Amino acid sequence: MIDTESLLYLCPLINPSLLAADFANLGRDIRRLEDAGAKILHLDVMDGHFVPNLSFGIPVVEAVRRSTELPLDVHLMIREPEKYLAPFRKAGADFLSVHIEVAPDPRALFDQIRKLGAIPGIVSNPPTPVEAVLPYINDCDLILTMSVMPGFGGQSFDLRVLEKLRQIRRAANEKMLISVDGGVGESTITETAVAGANVFVAGTALFGKPNINSQFQRLHHLAETTVVW
Ligand code: DX5
Ligand code: ZN
């Protein structure tokens, strides 16, 4: 199992969101991402309540786990996440991130996640003030800031994320994975890196292109030449 320290050493990380993959050829797409140099995979779990969409759940995480050894960053866009932490961990999740909007004080969830042997993360939506997450950022290892309203891939990047990233970067210790999710691509990745991100979730920007490998390299190069964290 991967630890945060080793991942920090590999930053900047392009974190491919499998939501945009071809689900009929998930194994093939994961292989392509590994060949491109991916060091982590992002899995978007949606419940149709917290977000107005459904994606996939425990059996798909388990199937992905069987097809790769890469760390799995499971983004839970669900209500009552406490009920599902153990099953997702059992299915193979390495990171389990919960939304501050459903867990205003997430510390008990972080403890539960660590006891399960996984790494906790906190996520906030674009309209949620950064002050809601700041008290907890040093209690978890991954701070994920949404740059779209969660629920769908392929939306446009919300510029409000940049100020949030700057404030999180200022308040966080240096051993923090600071991630941005939604609308991240060639035209937006550089500013998120300058603002403080070191982990870049990308769905459409990778899978929407004919050659995942060269697009991965392009995004990685943009992040690498900018990121100072
Ligand atoms: C949105 C998800 C994202 C999404 C990103 O609810 O959390 O991870 O897959 O997709 P793109 O990169 O297409 O905006
Ligand atoms: Zn996500």
Image (cartoon, grey):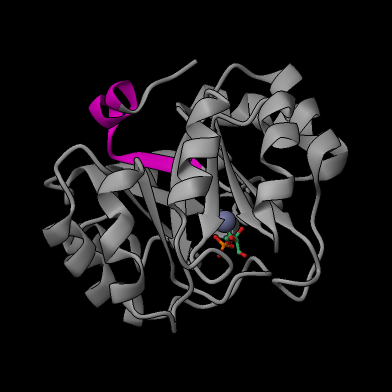
Instruction: Tell me where the magenta segment starts and ends, as one range.
Output: 5-15
- Quadrant location of residue 164? bottom left
Find out whether residue 134 is within the magenta segment: no
Do we see residue 198 in this rendering?
A: no
The residue shown at (59%, 59%) is 204
Give the x, y percent position of residue 96: 55, 41
Do we see residue 55 in this rendering?
A: yes
In the rendered image, the residue lying farthest to the front is 108
In this rendering, the answer to whether 69 lies above or below 92 is above
In this rendering, the answer to whether 27 lies above or below 124 is above
Give the x, y percent position of residue 6: 31, 21
In this rendering, the answer to whether 136 lies above or below 68 is below
Which quadrant: the C terminus?
top left
Q: Using residue 123 as the reference point, say whether residue 162 is left or right of it.
A: left
Give the x, y percent position of residue 70: 55, 22
The residue shown at (67%, 25%) is 92
The residue shown at (27%, 31%) is 8
Q: Using residue 31 as the reference point, say whether residue 26 is left or right of it.
A: right
Give the x, y percent position of residue 119: 46, 33
The residue shown at (70%, 71%) is 50
Question: Ligand 1 is located in which of the four quadrants?
Answer: bottom right
Find out whether residue 12 is within the magenta segment: yes
Nearest the eye: 107 or 191: 107
Nearest the eye: 30 or 7: 7
Q: Using residue 133 as the reference point, say whether residue 45 is left or right of it.
A: right
Nearest the eye: 50 or 26: 50
Nearest the eye: 48 or 109: 109
Q: How many marks?
A: 0
